[in-house]
Amino acid sequence: MNRKYSKEKNGKRVQGVIKKSNQVIFWPLVFVIIGFAILIGIAVYLGFSYYFSIAFLVWLVFLGGYLATNIFIKNKSVSLVTNFRIINFEQYGLFSYRVNEIDLKDIEKIAFKKTGIISNMFDSGSLYLFLKNSKEFLPIDYVYNPKDVAEGMKKLI
């Protein structure tokens, strides 16, 4: 958890901030690079002509916009851990988001999961906050260093 925030308001103190890992933009970045390689192939095959200009504009608008949108989503999705609750701000698109709040006293168990080569490469995974007297849980995906974050959150419960 990022502990550089320690503002206090009405007795509520921010204990940490959980941000998304860079794994969120890995696949969009791969698609942009593959698209650029295809674009260079078009330039070599057709030459730097009118068609290359159109292909470059299409690449710039679609794949560049796709990457920019994913970077925006990564930066807007954050979870705040206060001394009373966890507030999860989840951005899904440019105009779609969801906010969840869970009181710390309602959390029974915190678990994490890391799967796959990419998750281990970026040291990211998912946190699962299980609620007391319920089978429901709140997943927080693409968390950087989920083991340390889970251990830090268990100390607050």
Image: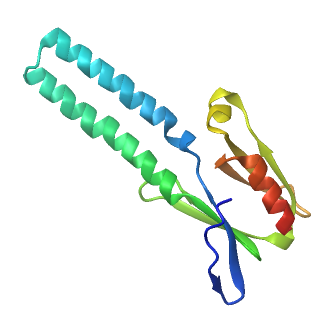
Left or right of 28 on screen, residue 127: right
Res. 44 image quadrant: top left
In the image, farthest residue toward the bottom: 10
**Residue 121, image x, y percentages:** 63, 32
**Residue 31, image x, y percentages:** 41, 29
Which residue is located at x 67 percent, y 90 percent? 10
Which residue is located at x 48 percent, y 58 percent? 96
**Residue 11, image x, y percentages:** 72, 88
Q: Quadrant of the C terminus?
A: bottom right
Q: Quadrant of the N terminus?
A: bottom right
Q: Is residue 130 above or below residue 11?
A: above
Res. 98 image quadrant: bottom right
Residue placed most toward the observer, 93 or 44: 44
Left or right of 77 on screen, residue 152: right
In the image, farthest residue toward the right: 133
Which residue is located at x 49 percent, y 56 percent? 75
In the image, farthest residue toward the front: 4
Q: Is residue 89 above or below residue 85?
A: above
Q: How is the image coloured?
A: rainbow
In the image, farthest residue toward the top: 45
Q: Is residue 122 visible?
A: yes
**Residue 51, image x, y percentages:** 12, 21
Q: Is residue 31 above or below residue 98?
A: above
Q: How many marks?
A: 0
Q: Is residue 88 visible?
A: no
Left or right of 138 on screen, residue 19: left
Which residue is located at x 25 percent, y 14 percent? 41
Left or right of 103 on screen, residue 96: left
